[in-house]
Image (tube, helix red, strand yellow):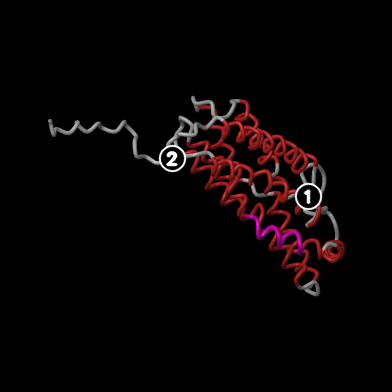
Amino acid sequence: MSTAQPAAVAPPSGAGVTRAGKRDVWLVFWIVPAFYTAFGAIFFLLARVMPPPRPDISTAEQVDFFTAHATTIQIGFAVLVLIVGGAGVANGIVAYHMKRMTTGSALAYAYIGSMAVGALPGCLLVAFCFLAAVYRPDRDPELLALLYDLGLLSYVGSLGCFTTAYFAFALAILFDRNEVFPKWLAYVSVWQIVTEILAVPVFVSKAGPFAWNGSISFWMGTVIFGVWLSSVIWFLRRATELTPDDEAPLP
């Protein structure tokens, strides 16, 4: 009887590589709408930052704003501090699918880095300004007025970081050949850049369409952002559905 052993068969290319399932991607995806729903409730219903209170009011009226909404500001922004990491999750899944594009990783890193930096003046600074204002309501009214202005100017006027992120996102979509996102989403992202540019006058306008609560600087930008965010969430879901179960982990 022959004792010869059969020749070893070489493993197929890629064998032994851990494959990426979609369960983790789906988990991350569902955090995104949950986070933005909570974000909207905090800013609209509790902290009263959306729509922003008027800039053309007296110091006494600014102090009255903090007095009237002290409790809900504390509750809302305390919750925000706990869940603000959800913004990183939302940015992360966008970057994940951007890295699946033929444009490579550089634009994905530009997007996530710009969004991360933008969260500081565009989200956290207003929270801490308002929390500091209601923490000691007996402060000098002029200091409370300073916190009021600083918080709302940073919130509405955080421009450059988000402009860079939207530019990277639009550029990646336009040059992508894998069709991860539809091309028209790039043009919606360009309109996001336009709204950021149109918000520049908030630093000098205290009334009218270019004030921080104005029809152009705030409301037009908010509507376009709502369209953009809804579209991104919808197509994140579609991109996740179309991700192959056996797709190798991204580098």
Q: Position of residue 226 (x, y in %)?
A: 72, 38
Q: Residue at x 64, y 43 (%)?
A: 30
Q: Give the mark nearer the N terminus: 1 vs 2.
A: 1
Which disc, if any, is residue 122?
Answer: none
Vertical order, 46 against 191 (above or below): below
For this orientation, the residue located farthest to the bottom is: 138
Vertical order, 209 against 153 (above or below): above
| Left or right: 227 as drawn, with respect to 98 | right
Q: Position of residue 197 (x, y in %)?
A: 66, 40
Crowd around label 2: few <14 · some 14–19 · many ≥20 (10 Å): few
Pick the quarter of the image with the C terminus.
top left
Q: Nearer the viewer, residue 87 or 136?
A: 87
Q: Nearer the viewer, residue 10 or 78?
A: 10
Disc 1 element: loop
Alpha carbon of mark 1 to alpha carbon of mark 2: how far? Answer: 40 Å
Crowd around label 1: few <14 · some 14–19 · many ≥20 (10 Å): some
Q: Magenta stretch containing residue 210, yes or no?
A: no
| Left or right: 206 as drawn, with respect to 39 | right
Q: Which residues, given as a range, are shown in magenta?
A: 74-84
**Please, what is the three-letter code of the amino acid marked with disc 2?**
Pro
The secondary structure that most of the magenta stretch takes on is helix
Instruction: Report if the CB atoms under discs 1 and 2 are less than 8 Å apart.
Output: no
Q: Residue at label 2?
A: 249
Q: Magenta stretch containing residue 82, yes or no?
A: yes
Disc 2 element: loop
Q: Residue at x 37, y 39 (%)?
A: 17
Vertical order, 175 against 62 (above or below): above
Which disc, if any, is residue 50?
Answer: 1
Q: Residue at x 76, y 62 (%)?
A: 75
**Please, what is the three-letter code of the amino acid marked with disc 1?**
Met
